[in-house]
């Protein structure tokens, strides 16, 4: 495949139509902004209200943590960099 644009969004290969617009939300920016806000506002409010305690209380937020106090808390990041991983709850408790 290859990237397409909103102005020319499709191409055909062997009778198959491909749509490869890299920034599909850009076609409906207001709707996209509302959708992103609806999906993320709750997490931002938790962080604002509770600080780091929000990560201890909510595994979804904790899953987004990559590094805390110099310790890598994300397995994929640790493996990619060749470092040991610290369990997020353990790192947050320190």
Image (cartoon, rainbow, N blue to C red):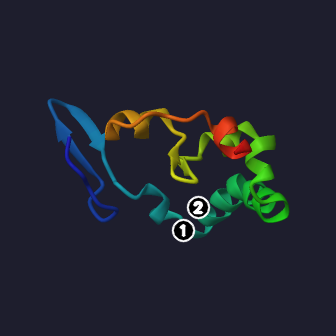
Residue at the (79%, 65%) spot, across then down: 48
Residue 6 at x, y = what percent?
Answer: 34, 62
Task: State if disc 1 and disc 2 touch (CB < 8 Å).
Answer: yes
View extreme (front): residue: 94
View extreme (bottom): residue: 30
Q: Residue 32 carries which label?
A: 2
Identify the image quadrant of the C terminus: top right
Q: Is residue 21 left or right of residue 67?
A: left
- The residue lying toward the viewer, choosing from 48 and 92, is 92
Residue assigned mark 1: 29
Q: In what element is the residue under mark 2?
A: helix
Q: Residues within 10 Å of mark 2 (few under 14, many from 20)?
A: some
Residue at the (73%, 61%) spot, across then down: 44
Q: Is residue 63 left or right of residue 77?
A: right
Q: Residue 54 carries which label?
A: none
Residue 5 at x, y = what percent?
Answer: 29, 60
Q: Residues within 10 Å of mark 1 (few under 14, many from 20)?
A: few
Residue at the (60%, 33%) spot, across then down: 87
Q: In this view, does 9 lie above or below 61?
A: below
> In which quarter of the view is residue 24 placed?
bottom left
- The residue lying toward the viewer, choosing from 17 and 23, is 23
Residue at the (66%, 57%) spot, across then down: 35
Identify the image quadrant of the N terminus: top left
> In which quarter of the view is residue 33 placed?
bottom right
Residue 25 at x, y = what percent?
Answer: 49, 59
Q: In what element is the residue under mark 1?
A: helix
> In which quarter of the view is residue 80 placed?
top left
View extreme (left): residue: 14
- The residue lying toward the viewer, choosing from 17 and 68, is 68
Residue 40 at x, y = what percent?
Answer: 69, 56
View extreme (right): residue: 49
């Amino acid at each position: 495949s290859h990237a397409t644009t909103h102005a020319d969004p499709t191409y055909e290969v062997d009778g198959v139509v491909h749509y490869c617009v890299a920034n599909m939300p850009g076609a409906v920016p207001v709707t996209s902004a509302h959708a992103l806000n609806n999906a993320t506002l709750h997490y931002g409010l938790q962080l604002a209200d509770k600080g780091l305690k929000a990560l201890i209380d909510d595994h979804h937020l904790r899953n987004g943590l990559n590094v805390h106090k110099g310790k890598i808390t994300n397995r994929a990041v640790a493996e990619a960099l060749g470092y040991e991983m610290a369990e997020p709850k353990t790192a947050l408790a320190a």
